[in-house]
Image (tube, coloured by chain):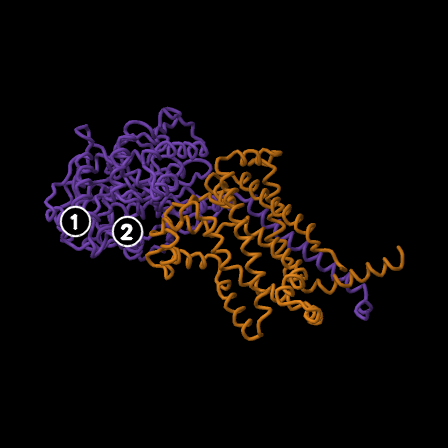
Chain colours: A purple, B orange
Amino acid sequence: MSRGSAPPRTSSRRLRRSVLALLAMTGMVVIAACGGSSSSSPKPGASKSSNSLTVWVDAARLPVAQAYVKAHPKVHVNIVTFDGDGNGATTMQTKIQLWNRTGGGWPDVVFSEQVNDPVWMAQKPFEFAAPLKGLIPDDLLSKWPAPSTAQCTINGMQYCVQDNLAQVVLWVNKKLMDEFGYAVPKTWQEWAALGQKVAAEHPGYIVGNIGDSFGHWIYLWGNQCPLEQSQGSKLLINSTDEHCTRVAGLLDPMIKNGTVPPLSVFTPDFAQKYGGAKDKVLLMPGPSWYAQALFDQTLHIPAGEITAAPPLQWENETPITTGQVGGGPWIIAKRSGNLTGAADFVIWATTVFSPTGKDARPGYPAYAPLADKWLADLAGNSYFAADPTPALKAAAGQVWSGWTLVTYPDQPVWSNTVVTQLVAGKSLSSLMQPFGDALAQAAQASGYTVARQ
Amino acid sequence: MSPVRAQATRTRSLRAARGLPFVLPYLPFLVVFGILPMIYALYLAFTTDTGDWAGLGNFTRTISDYRFLPAFEHILLYTGVWLGSLIVIVVGLALLLHGRANRVSATFRFLFYIPGALAGASAVLVWLFMLDPSVSPGSFLLHLLGSQLFVESIAPGKLPFVFAMIAFWTGAGGWIVVMYGALNTIPHELEEAARIDGAGPMTVALRLKLPLIRKWIAYMTILAFATGTQLFVEPQLVNQASLGLVPDTWSSNQLAYQMAFRYGDFNAAAAISVDLIAIGLIAAWLIVKRTGLFRTGD
């Protein structure tokens, strides 16, 4: 064969040598790069100059950041939008691990949709959040309601301020209720009875939904179900407690008769079946930010129909407690190179930013003086059929404090152990035990000692 | 060294020398993004977070994690479905195309290839719409399969099949082109000889062409197995799009990701990655052994 005779062996040897040299070089570059990052001590975050800030926000908080830029033309603000850790996503954890590992890149301020995010942000291995003492004046901090401050306090130190309160109330379609001649229920029992009535008299209409990743915060948190309760060094997860099973038993017939469908309010399916022109939402237990963000902007329910009623009560039990969905916090990064600037941003975003009308903040401001302003604006908002503010205001102080915020997200556990099975036709009562088991596993994997009874 | 063997060694080294320029541009990438990370993963998998020797500690710890077995079960079922359909349908379609007139087969090859031009993540986004009965152009099919809602389309039992379908849709076209190329290497005389001996198109396809492209099929199987067990993008995006209905630890690669970033346990993550490398290597070794992929001169 002529092929075998041609090129001299030296060329192949030279080639091999050059390949080896190349390999050695790339290897050295990589080793040098690795060595560089591991040996250097953590450097300050993205903003080295006192005039620049990097802020991470979700889409709903983008207007705040943009308004800050407008109001502070001299500050250079780099705004980054992300999913806000919605639905228990772990975006921030990924990013923080990478920043910590590479020793740089931290933003100065972060907004999270998860009220429990500061809990892990303040602790190892993340150690991302800065204590607010000394950054935000005490007299300002004292104007957040006590339960809100408590949610931001980890091991005795305050690490965040809540942007908004997300207390659950009963949203009411006043126009439809009047049309059908129904009275607004005051207790869960009246609500369930009305559900049975609606199923018989007006099939297709709904009095709630249970398909969201936060369904347990609406129905179980408010009814004092001990799914995450700190008890000394242990975490109590008792999903078969009477407070849990009695709600499940109440909901099951309603899930079955279609008045509380296992569908998320944010799916196209939901909007198509119950929203807009169909207008089939009669009642809906849900958080304060549903006000316009959901009914007006997502479901496009016409103006002049929706209002809020106080949270539902269990029979005649007092005090009335309710759940919470969100209440996202602002967090300042410990490694920020511009702590003063970061604090200024957070103060402005939570205590100053307050546009009115259609640009109004989506949620009930956590900072009390701003809440009054927001409520006054909402009371005069022509979208609502009646003033929703008394109910919202009353519910603000009723969020059950027996629900401890934990380091792991519980939303995915609810979604994939309960919601998927509800869709498949199982009863909520039969899912309470597996839900508790799955929560316990998630808690143990995050290092909690779990008590089940 | 005998003269014959010396000659053989020389021929081999010459061949290698000619191949090198073709491999060279890829080598730095292989080293930086393939080999070095693998070595780093091996180092992490056998050490603790302080750098001490951990033995098999990281492996036993991850195996006893409550999400480990379900994740591997999902992956095995998915890979099984995907590999099965890939081998049967890709080879079948390539054989069918190869029997057609040139223009027809060129058109079809192009059609099959188009979806593969979409990057992984965007292909998943397309499928998120395809699987939602309220917006899907194929909603009647979804209704036939019992899905009235998106949540029903992605019910846990259907997921391995859904992901296999997405992977097949994006990946099969490229392989059909490769298999077609492989079929083209079969000398025309062989086919003609078979025809003269009375072989019909079926016999030619199954008895002549199929055995001759065996090595290409083996090659495809090895690569497809490796990418199959490393499934990540599809379940991760469906997890986000379904608002958490699909667990974020559905696949073993996702579990490794969660270990690293949710718990900051990079050693556990590395251990799971090493499990995946080991499974891939064992599968590749078995396939190479069984099919004689690297056997030369036959």
- Indicate left or right for A294 with B76 as reference: left
Q: Give residue A251's position: percent from left, percent from top.
A: 26, 37
Give the quarter of the image for residue A393: top left
Q: Which mark is residue A382?
A: none
Q: Is residue A412 above or below residue A276?
A: above
Q: Give residue B281's position: percent from left, percent from top.
A: 64, 47
**Residue A165 makes an appearance in the image:** no
Give the quarter of the image for residue B24: bottom right
Query: Which of B72 and A123 lies nearest the eye of the viewer?
Result: B72
Quarter in which the N terminus of chain B is drawn: bottom right
- Indicate left or right for A228 with A199 as reference: right
Three-letter code for the amino acid on which mark 1 is drawn: Ile
Residue at the spot of label 1: A306
Q: Give residue B164's position: percent from left, percent from top.
A: 49, 53
Q: Chain of mark 1?
A: A
In front: mark 2 or mark 1?
2
Three-letter code for the amino acid on which mark 2 is drawn: Phe
Judging from the image, what secondary structure is the residue with disc 1 in? strand
